[in-house]
Every structure is written in structure tokens, then in C-alpha cells.
Image (cartoon, rainbow, N blue to C red):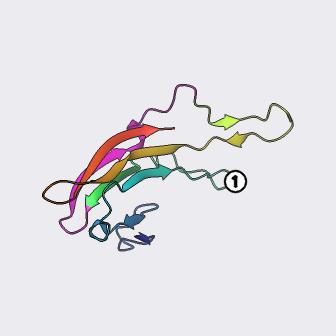
Amino acid sequence: MNYLDDIRDPVLKINDDRKIQIQLGGIREPGTCIVLCVREFDNSGKPPAKEGEFDRAWFRLANEETNQTIDYNMITKIEKPEEYQEYITNEDDEEAAPVRNELTYLHGILYLEAHDTGNKWVFESFKDCF
């Protein structure tokens, strides 16, 4: 698995482009499951984002060899939990600053399924948030 932080030509760079490459061919154990999730950064204490700067934030699952997108989603289209509050106050210490309630977006899972003809990777899309 590789984590790449600077993946685009500087002229084409969009905010925080990041990529994780997983070489699935090297994984051979049936039943292996990979959970694909994205966790929000806590940007408190940093300069405020420009209005609409993250309106088009998204993540995708793609085949690097064929450049085929398997699944993608815009973060703004994923519903937040009904009870979600952006900031949580400490009930024991009312003078303490509220803590940011970070979200984790569950894109889906990849799992290696055993078949008579060989193993096969299966992707299930969830597009959920907690």
C-alpha cells in the first residue's frame, strides 16, 4: 500500500489531492476485508476556508491500470446523522471550549471472496457517515 500526497502537476492541483494505492494482486487470503473510509480534518484554529471552497470535495475508487472509476461520491451528498452536532460541549466543565465533532465517511468495503475458479475481489458501496 502506498500513500501519495502530491499527485498532480502544480498547475492542475486541487486543494488537498491525496491518493492511496493498494496492490490487490499481492493479497491472496480469502476473507480479507478492506474498509474504505475518509476522516474529516479538524480545521479549527486555521484560517477560514473561502466560501464554497469544499463544495466539490469528493472521493473515488479507481483502477489505476485502466484509469476506470469504480465508484465515487461527493461528500456534500452524504447525509449526516440526524443527531449530529458540529461542536460538543463538556457537561462537566461548562467553561471548557467546545470540542469539534469530527465525521468519518464510510465509502465502502473491498473483500476477497473464494470461488471455484479462483479468488475474486468484491466491492460494496455504503456512502454513509458517522
Q: Where is residue 62 in the image (x, y as percent from the top left)?
A: 27, 59
Splitting the image into 4 quarters, where does residue 5 fall? bottom left
Q: What element carries label 1?
A: loop
Q: Give the range drawn in magenta.
A: 63-83
Task: Name, please, the residue furthest toward the left.
Answer: 117
Amino acid beneath label 1: Gly
Is residue 99 a member of the stretch shown in magenta?
A: no
Splitting the image into 4 quarters, where does residue 92 fall? top right
Which residue position holds label 1?
45
Judge left or right: residue 104 versus residue 117: right
Q: Position of residue 13 (x, y in %)?
A: 39, 67
* Residue 65 higher or lower than 90, as above or below: below
Judge left or right: residue 76 versus residue 63: right
Q: Can residue 14 be seen in this view?
A: yes
Q: Which of 114 and 130 is in front in this view?
A: 114
Q: Position of residue 73 (x, y in %)?
A: 34, 45
Residue at 31% across / 43% down in the picture? 125
Residue at 32% across / 52% down in the picture? 110
Q: Which of 7 and 65 is in front in this view?
A: 65
Is residue 65 a member of the stretch shown in magenta?
A: yes
Residue at 21% across / 59% down in the picture? 119
Q: Which of 76 and 49 is in front in this view?
A: 76
Q: Where is residue 33 in the image (x, y as percent from the top left)?
A: 37, 53
* Residue 112 higher or lower than 25, as above or below: above
Splitting the image into 4 quarters, where does residue 46 fall? bottom right
* Quadrant assignment for the N terminus: bottom left
